[in-house]
Image (cartoon, rainbow, N blue to C red):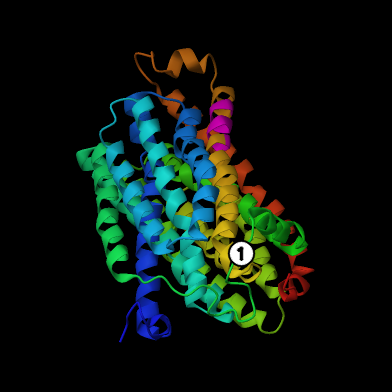
């Protein structure tokens, strides 16, 4: 019988654990839809509100990231002491509601404020979820569990890309925000009613579960483990590249190959779904399998994947047809995401049970503030810069918000400028691979340390 009075009964029940992991993955899927839906809508929002690529990068990146950064660690510290499932459920409801509110925005400032609300909700839920998963699964299965949870990224990309673009084409971009936000409210209620708070540290005998270490102890764990610093750094650089590239991908396909919003959104979703899912699953299960033979494989397998991303992305951006570009982008996605479950599992395995939400928050802060915050903004600013250079004449006067007619030359310059920006962003994967490879050197020793 699964009761709160007998927690070990339901935490050891394989069917119930599978349900919890599935529900968390569903919540994270719609969370990722809500986080990235704006990237599918870059072109229609930009056309209606007449804003630059840099401002669109700000909308999808730094606006979300700043509030996430400010709140994630305080909420994670609360999750070390209080009921994590309640915190996750409240956060889910908040970001779902904020996404729906985006559909009511009548100008750029209002849209900016609504996106801030999405960041607040995400800050409440994400760190505690990793901590709960770690208490449901033993350390030798955590990368696999994190891989299943990580399927939210490709599934969210597929839903957000295909549905978001289709809805925007037929009913407008505001309707896309409504549809993206509402399912999360139902999932928040389902979490609240069906997910039980697991005993902390039940899969980690010998570790401290009675008291909550100070936040300084969490930071010290990071500082004293060189492999963890390198792995988190490599993951952060990959996140910068990934968010920067994916945020403008649908806009690039529209500008470069003339696809409409629905076609570009669907294509982006398909490219980012099955290939990315295979990458995440392979990254989790393959690193758990290889890690039994040597801990260094937890870092080397992701390093190999990210190293291949740079040349594959550059080849995709040089393709003459959207079909050739799509094939290359799909192959890239199969290499791109292997680091996600491995980095998450390594962080959880190096922390005491009451450090894990805080450690996940630190990682989330880094990935969100640096990756999602700077990635789209950097690509947007580079795109504006190279677009102006690609245009013969004064681009701002000829193609800006006050221009009576936007010419074919304006569109060609915008496509070329974004192409150059995306190509430069892809080079970041080489930097990421170097960090991950360096982390492999001392990973076994650092995982074996207890204090």
Q: Residue at x 50, y 64 (%)?
A: 130
In this view of the protein, which residue sits in the foreground, 85 or 120? 85
Q: Is residue 269 visible?
A: no
In percent of width and height, residue 374 lies at: 57, 39
Which residue was labeled with disc 1?
343
Label 1 neighbourhood size at 10 Å, few (<14), some (14-19), many (20+)? Answer: many
Left or right: residue 439 versus residue 261 is right
Where does the magenta region start and end? Answer: 378-385
Q: Which residue is drawn at 44% across and 43% down?
A: 119
Q: Residue at x 51, y 37 (%)?
A: 62
In percent of width and height, residue 250 lies at: 41, 44
In percent of width and height, residue 194 lies at: 30, 70
User: Looking at the image, which residue sits at the far left?
Assistant: 171
> Tag 1's secondary structure?
helix
Q: Is residue 383 magenta?
A: yes
Q: Can residue 363 be seen in this view?
A: yes
In this view of the protein, which residue sits in the foreground, 354 or 356? 354
| Image quadrant occupied by the N terminus | bottom left
In the rendered image, the vertical position of residue 185 relative to residue 114, given as above or below: below
In percent of width and height, residue 335 lies at: 57, 64
Q: How many labels does the image show?
A: 1
| Image quadrant occupied by the C terminus | bottom right
Q: Is residue 324 magenta?
A: no
In this view of the protein, which residue sits in the foreground, 112 or 302? 112
In this view of the protein, which residue sits in the foreground, 252 or 73? 73
User: Residue 186, located in which quarter of the rendered image?
Assistant: bottom left
In the rendered image, the vertical position of residue 46 relative to residue 326, given as above or below: above
Left or right: residue 340 versus residue 327 is right
Q: Is the magenta stretch mostly helix, strand or loop?
A: helix
User: Residue 306, located in which quarter of the rendered image?
Assistant: bottom right
């Amino acid at each position: 019988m699964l009761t709160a009075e007998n927690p070990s009964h339901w935490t050891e029940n394989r069917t119930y654990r599978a349900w919890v992991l599935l529900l968390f993955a569903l919540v994270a899927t719609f969370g990722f839809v809500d986080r990235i839906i704006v990237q599918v809508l870059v072109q229609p929002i930009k056309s209606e509100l007449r804003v630059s690529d840099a401002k669109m990068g700000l909308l999808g990146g730094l606006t979300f990231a700043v509030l996430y950064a400010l709140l994630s660690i305080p909420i994670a510290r609360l999750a070390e002491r209080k009921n994590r499932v309640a915190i996750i459920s409240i956060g889910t409801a908040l970001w779902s509601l904020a996404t729906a509110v985006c559909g009511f925005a009548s100008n750029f400032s209002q849209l900016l404020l609504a996106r801030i609300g999405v960041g607040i909700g995400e800050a409440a839920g994400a760190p505690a979820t990793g901590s709960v998963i770690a208490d449901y699964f033993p350390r030798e299965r955590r990368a696999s569990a994190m891989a299943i949870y990580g399927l939210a990224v490709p599934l969210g990309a597929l839903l957000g890309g295909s549905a978001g673009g289709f809805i925007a084409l037929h009913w407008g971009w505001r309707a896309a925000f409504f549809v993206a936000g509402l399912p999360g409210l139902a999932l928040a209620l389902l979490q609240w009613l069906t997910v039980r708070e697991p005993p902390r540290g039940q899969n980690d005998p010998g570790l401290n579960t009675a008291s909550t270490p100070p936040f300084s102890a969490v930071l010290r764990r990071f500082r004293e483990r060189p492999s963890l610093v390198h792995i988190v750094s490599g993951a952060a650089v990959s996140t910068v590249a990934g968010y920067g590239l994916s945020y403008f991908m649908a806009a690039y396909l529209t500008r470069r190959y003339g696809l409409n919003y629905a076609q570009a959104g669907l294509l982006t979703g398909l490219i980012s779904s099955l290939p990315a899912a295979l990458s995440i699953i392979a990254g989790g299960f393959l690193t758990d399998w290889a890690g039994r033979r040597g801990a260094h494989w937890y870092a080397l397998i992701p390093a190999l994947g990210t190293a291949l991303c740079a040349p594959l992305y550059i080849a995709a951006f040089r393709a003459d047809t959207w079909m050739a570009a799509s094939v290359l982008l799909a192959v890239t996605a199969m290499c791109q995401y292997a680091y996600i479950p491995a980095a998450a599992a390594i962080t959880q395995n190096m922390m005491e049970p009451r450090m894990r939400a805080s450690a996940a928050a630190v990682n989330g802060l880094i990935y969100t503030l640096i990756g999602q915050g700077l990635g789209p903004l950097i690509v947007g600013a580079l795109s504006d810069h190279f677009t102006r250079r690609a245009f013969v004449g004064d681009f701002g006067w000829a193609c800006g918000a006050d221009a009576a007619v936007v010419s074919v030359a304006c569109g060609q310059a915008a496509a070329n400028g974004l192409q150059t920006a995306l190509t430069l962003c892809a080079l970041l994967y080489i930097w990421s691979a170097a960090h991950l490879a360096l982390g492999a050197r001392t990973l076994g020793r650092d995982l074996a340390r207890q204090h």
